Image: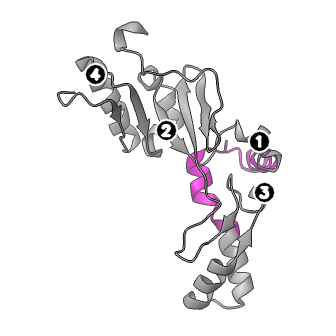
Amino acid sequence: RDAGADVLFPTSYLRDALLLMEDMDTLGFAPEMVIAVGAGFGQSEFYQDPVSEFTCATSAYSDGLEEEIPELGTYANHVQEQTGVTPSFIYMNAWGGVFPMLKAIDNAGSTDPDAIRESLHDTVIESAARTGMPHGLRYDETGHNELAANVIVQNFTDGPDMVWTADGIVDDNFTYPFPTWDNR
């Protein structure tokens, strides 16, 4: 607060995320934007608390992606029907890499780590529906997935809403700057 930061980029577990926001409220600290790296800021327990309102977080998944990538909606519905788990960024980060890894192991024809690593590097999956993530998979020569993409969600009283994709702002409800605590 004393530094007069315009943007706050926190990352923490759930309880620390809530404590941070509660302390910001107590201190009246409201930078122009709070944009977190998922983690506790992306859990349903966080965005159900009123102090989370108007915070943003990076995410590997949002309900809004289902319109953009219908296969992802089909996958999310299947997951919910079969497991009772509502897909979230945590789910997608944890589970999304399973399909590409299984494909790489199958293509390697071996459980040798070097063979799997090489196979994974050579694996190309263009469709999000086949990765379980909101993007495909294609590694460049440095080992980075060229198709990887996150979205930014903003928390509102009724839950998180996708407000930004690689194409820019996608929601008219995007609230900027972060409202001061006494103007809510």
Dot in front, 1 or 3: 1
Q: Looking at this view, is 111 or 145 the one in front? A: 145
Mark 1 to mark 4 CA distance (whole Å): 36 Å
Q: Residue at x 65, y 73 (%)?
A: 101
Q: Give the range drawn in magenta.
A: 73-99
At label 1, which amino acid type do we have? Glu
For label 2, count other residues whose C-alpha is less than 10 Å away and answer few (under 14), some (14-19) or many (20+).
many
* Residue 9 on image: x %, y %: 36, 40
* Residue 161 on image: x %, y %: 61, 30
Mark 1 to mark 3 CA distance (whole Å): 12 Å
For label 4, count other residues whose C-alpha is less than 10 Å away and answer few (under 14), some (14-19) or many (20+).
some
As for residue 167 lying within the magenta part, the answer is: no
In-image side of 116 versus 47 (left or right) = right
- The reply to whether callout 4 and callout 2 are in contact (CB within 8 Å) is no
Q: Looking at this view, is 92 or 1 the one in front? A: 1
Mark 4 to mark 3 CA distance (whole Å): 41 Å
Residue at the farthest top position: 183
